Amino acid sequence: MSVDADATPTVATRAGRIAILDPFPVVDCARWPARAYEGEWVPFEVTSYREGHDLMGVILELTAPDGQVHRHRMEYANRGLDRWATRARIRQAGRWQFRFWAFGDDWETWLHDAGIKIPRRLDTELTLAIGAQLLERASSDADRTDTVRAEFARLAAVMRDTAVSPEERFHRASQDRIAQEFRLRPAASVESRSAVFDLVVDRERAGFSAWYELFPRSAGARFIKSRQQWKSGTFRTAARELPRIAELGFDIVYLPPIHPIGLTNRKGRNNSLTPHPGDPGSPWAIGSAQGGHDAVHPDLGTLSDFRTFVRAAHRAGLEVAIDLALQASPDHPWVREHPEWFTTLPGGSIAFAENPPKKYQDIYPINFDNDPAGIRAEVLRICEHWIAQGVTLFRVDNPHTKPTEFWEWLIAAVRSQHPEVIFLAEAFTRPAPMRTLAKVGFQQSYSYFAWRHTPGELADYFTEVSHETAHFLRPNFFPTTPDILTPYLENGGRGASIARAVLAATGSSSWGMYSGFEILETAKRPDADEQLDNEKYEYRPRDWEAARADGHSIEDVVRALNRARREIPALHQLRNITIHHSDDPAVFVYSKCTPADPATGEPPSGVIVVVNTAAHTDISTLIHLDMTALGLDPGAQFPVTDMLTGAQWTWSETSFVRLDMNAIPAHVARITYPDRT
């Protein structure tokens, strides 16, 4: 019985001629773009297969912001699961696009079949004629150069020349240069292309950065005995700290709120409700009769003084980040001018901030559902104001307590005019809101690092942030903050502080240090996991020279860590962590490696980090390394240099280490790779 072709029902299909499935990196089915930063090696993966036994290939097509298309041939990451992968180094900021091209690889199929048939004299001339046809087809491809097209035409003629032996004809067709030409311009009879996906590439500092948190009021503060009262540090006295911060190797100085502080319900020392005369209050209780979020505290100086501070930071090679804390003291001008921006309780009072049992009587939270348009306009104005003063980064206080859609709007609005501006989320919260804040635009995020201590916890967390979420969330590792001081650091002594600094500076491509960490400030308040005599509520000038003289300084370690970060390209990356093994369960071992970059001639780079996580315990043990992950041959011996001490050793798959908690309980071992030129 014949079938009328016109009567064949039309049915929509989604598989494609060659199936393309599970593309990566794609965020929530492309609801938001994936993210990368300048200089980052970005992994791309996709699942793709075809029917039958003919070979296939997959090419990643990357389109740069200028429209130039870059092709990368993908290889099997897991043949049994039909998973393909490649890495591409992204060097230009802007909005990129990518898609996957899967195709039946006619040339590779022919090479495979001919390699079997010709030695066995099976269908020899027919097989060579098929090869000639493929070359003739490729010689008419306008995408190839005239030189290549001419070479293919000549080779096609040779393939049909029976005066030349079949073995010689096949040998000529099997040359590497021919295969390379077909790798990125394949001979494809069937093909599919995926949807197009976005990749937002930020400037390098969004992904590779070292932050230093400084309270300007403490820098240069002094106690006046005659008045029994403190005199605040200023922007000018704080600027004297900038050369030291830069010399330690940091590239961003972050200032907590620098605005006027309210008097109503002002907090006293250690968060008490009874301030003493002269207590400065919490900088996060923003606003007074002297101004709000667009003003500077008069004790710190003037707006002109702040601009001078920013210029001094730039001369030192530092960018300036300030706090964006969207809340208000009861004395903030907003309370008088825009009472609708707050929540009014029965009886007429405004609700202060609380997270039971914690209460913040000096702060009114904003109600973003009251006059959202007005609030958006005001916050955008504030951001524009500080950008005009030279600020290029905002550390956002508690963004998870505000509507996510507000941040999505604000970050997009700011970056549409100022794409260089970076937003860091201080979102110590549950995984879902933390991750979603990153998806909607935050370029960096505080993390759970401070609470991950054992090698097992660290291995799980480092794997998560480097491989599972790195395509949208970039963690910033702070060992401590004004709000966080863990028992491990409180009780672990100098060795514990060094261990946490090493983990923070090498585990993530971005890390931060709160002022005082480098001189071992680890005394804890009895009623909270934060520092005693907390700088949030009082002046805390520091005597760096005295700390060094007393041996209470790890500045040399911090300096060495930041130098290693600058000098070792592998430490510029986030997605390249591999966990290795130690015989001692308290020793954590991991590496970060990058391949040679043929585009720039940059050689491979690698570092092995070994950390003793057991406070007060010296450890000698063996470590066992995955040589393939290091880019080295199994069984090879290779030189390493410890970036913390300068010591040099020759290591292999199994190597001995000794980690002394009274000295430096870690190695940051830079690999010297063999010259393979």
Image: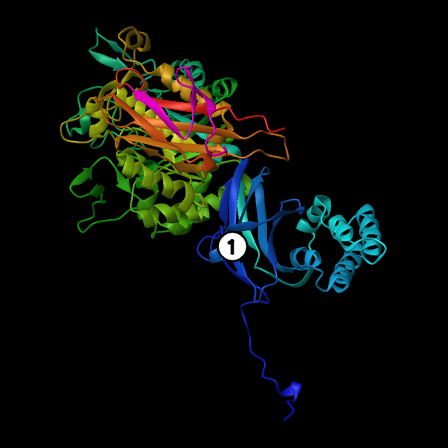
Where 12 falls versus 440 (above or below)?
Answer: below
Residue under the point 63% across and 35% down: 598
Counting every numbered tag in the picture gives 1
Q: Amino acid at mark 1?
A: Val
Taking depth in this image into account, of 456 and 519 the one nearest to the observer is 456
Position of 172 with respect to 479 (left or right) is right
Q: Which residue is mark 1?
A: 46
Tell me where the magenta segment starts and ends, as one range. Answer: 632-659
Taking depth in this image into account, of 639 and 340 the one nearest to the observer is 639
Where 241 falls versus 675 (above or below)?
Answer: above
Where residue 620 appears, as percent x and y from the top left, is 28, 22
Position of 372 with respect to 206 (left or right) is left
Residue 634 highlighted magenta (yes or no):
yes
Where residue 534 appears, as percent x and y from the top left, is 23, 24
Residue under the point 44% across and 33% down: 592
Which quadrant holds the C terminus?
Answer: top right
Taking depth in this image into account, of 511 and 672 the one nearest to the observer is 672
Residue 469 highlighted magenta (yes or no):
no
Taking depth in this image into account, of 298 and 421 the one nearest to the observer is 421
Q: Is residue 34 visible?
A: yes
Q: Residues within 10 Å of mark 1 (few under 14, many from 20)?
A: many
Where residue 135 appears, as percent x and y from the top left, is 77, 56
Res 591 → quadrant: top left
